[in-house]
Image: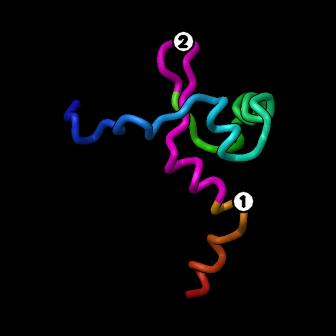
Amino acid sequence: MPTDTLPSRGELVDEHEAAAILSTAVRTLRNWRSLRKGPRYRKIGARMVRYHRADLAEFQRVMAGDDDAERAA
């Protein structure tokens, strides 16, 4: 895999940092994952879960309803 397509250091965050960014509980993120809801995440190996900062920002934008403004323009 070319290194230019890999996330740079700091772009992937663990579930604790993702919960802080989204102002929610880690337990909520875990629940969303089990329900296949919430922001996109990556599983690394069998147990490691990471979130991409851009996916968290997109999730916040959609939840805030900002996608409606783009459609109207």
When asked about the image quadrant of residue 39, the answer is top right
Relative to 6, is 57 on the left or the right? right
Q: Position of residue 69 (x, y in %)?
A: 63, 80
Residue at (54% x, 12% y) in the render = 46
The N terminus - image quarter: top left
Q: Position of residue 50 (x, y in %)?
A: 54, 30
Q: Secondary structure at mark 2?
A: loop
Q: Secondary structure at mark 1?
A: helix
**Given the current orientation, which residue lies at the most extreme bottom position?**
73
Pointer 1: what residue? 63
Q: Position of residue 65 (x, y in %)?
A: 71, 69
Pointer 2: what residue? 46
Q: Amino acid at mark 2?
A: Ala
When asked about the image quadrant of residue 34, the answer is top right
Residue at (62% x, 70% y) in the render = 67
Q: Which residues are magenta?
A: 43-60
- Residue 29's mark? none
When asked about the image quadrant of residue 11, the answer is top left
Q: Amino acid at mark 1?
A: Met
The C terminus - image quarter: bottom right
Q: Position of residue 26 (x, y in %)?
A: 75, 30
Q: Is residue 57 magenta?
A: yes
Are the residues flagged by discs 1 and 2 in contact, CB closer than 8 Å? Answer: no
Relative to 5, is 57 on the left or the right? right
Q: Which numbered disc flags the more N-terminal residue, 1 or 2?
A: 2
Q: Is residue 63 magenta?
A: no
